[in-house]
Image (cartoon, grey):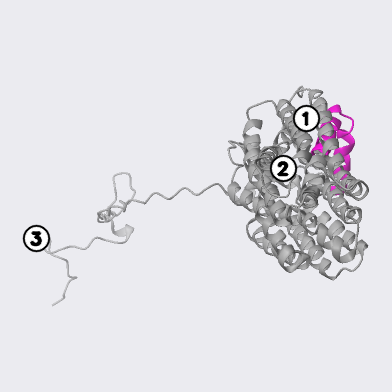
Amino acid sequence: MAIGPLVPSMHPADTGPVSAPTDLTDLPDEPNGQPQQPPQPQQPQQAQKPQPARKPQPRRPHYAWVVAGVALLVLVGAAGFRSTPGLMMESLHHEFGWSHGLISSAVSVNLALYGLTAPFAAALMDRFGMRLVVTNALLMIAAGSGLTVFMTAGWQLVLCWGVLVGLGSGSMAGAFATTVSGRWFSARQGLVTGVLTAGGAAGNLVFLPLLAWLVEQHGWRSAAVVVSLCATVVAVPVLLLMREHPADVGLLPYGAQTAPPPPADSGAALTRALRVLAVAVRTRPFWLLATTFAICGATTAGLVGTHFVPAAHDHGMPATTAAGLLSLVGVFDVVGTIASGWFTDRFDSRWLLVTYYGLRGASLLLLPGLFAGSLHPGILAFVIFYGLDWVATVPPTIALCRQWFGADAPVVFGWVLACHQIGAALVAYAAGVARDHLGDYDAAWYAAGGLCAVAVLLCLGLRPARTAAPA
């Protein structure tokens, strides 16, 4: 008997499971002749787990404040390094027999190079970066100060403390503060400039009493070694923390709402510094600002910063006490300069300068009668009053440079600062020569008071910028 093919039973009682066909050719056709699509298996829905609440992240300060903090540390150190020769003047005079004029000539070279380096330093920072320029400047100061312990002739003092330390400190001059505040801050530029400028005063506050004590107790060589070591140490945070622009860390300048335009390629640093100077010297504001700032340098770093301690010593005051008074000038300079930055953001910079130079001149005219062998209320009042005015001129002078010269303001201010230091250099040397020939410093104090009166008249000749150039 033949056996036919087995056919699955389609009886209703047959309720066993039937697997879904997997080949499209096995599917029945739809009316249009196309095969039906197999049903898609549904994925089981998984219950979503509740996400844990995120803890609010603490808001970190803007990196601009880190850069400003490093810059402040550098400027504090630079000021302390620069003020050391005035403390060593009597020790060098007695050990080597050098005249006050010779020792003052090293200070004069230091101050002149400090100023002449400043405009090129600003351009070099634009070209090679702040970190590279400042680090090399600190190492130059370390070398110059350290080598002085081996000197035996006056020209070596001029070379080490005049040339090397002058070039190094000039590379970290006011142009550095201007560059930092201009690049990293859109808001509070005046305040930041004032704080950084006050770093010079803080440097005197920190270093002068210590260095004076070292000179008196252990000799001037110990002070030179300490300066060398400190300059080397300060270079470390510059290498680790300094950044060139806010964009390097993915930020806008502090207080800015839009990104600043990229810096233009201005060519070689020397070319830019000279090109900016060639444009600036054809303007009246440049000469007024440069001359008044030269008087500022003459009456502060050149005269008081260099010769206050020897002048007080001439009247019987111990060098450590006189250095303490000079550091106290630094205490009130911090207050005065920061306040001046705050005033600069709110008041006319020209009238601020008129006020500052007028008050400074009056105090210098009174100083010769205040010196004595011990502390008394009169000399303390001078120190407080003069300290508040010491470098209060810097924030309004920088603000006027920005108004007139815009994006070139850091380089222009570098040249204005060069004039400041040239004035300081001339008076530092002249006051030393006057001391050798006249036996005291009285003529130098009276002449400085007269120079401040001239500065007042020049500031009155300044006019507001017709249009504020973009910084």
Quickly name the residue at label 1: 404
157 is higher (above) or lower (below) than 353: below
Quickly name the residue at label 2: 178
* Magenta residues, dominant SS class: helix
Residue ID at (87%, 53%)? 104
Q: Amino acid at mark 2?
A: Thr
Q: Quadrant of the N terminus?
A: bottom left
Look at discs 3 and 1 and give the one toward the viewer: 1
Q: Amino acid at mark 3?
A: His
Q: Which residues are magenta?
A: 269-296
Q: CA distance from mark 3 to mark 2?
A: 99 Å
Q: Position of residue 319 (x, y in %)?
A: 74, 56
Q: Secondary structure at mark 1?
A: helix
Q: Is residue 250 left or right of residue 429?
A: left
Q: Position of residue 226 (x, y in %)?
A: 71, 65
Say which quarter of the image contains residue 157. bottom right
Which sits in the foreground, 367 or 183?
A: 367
Quickly name the residue at label 3: 11
Assess whether residue 288 is covered by the magenta stretch: yes
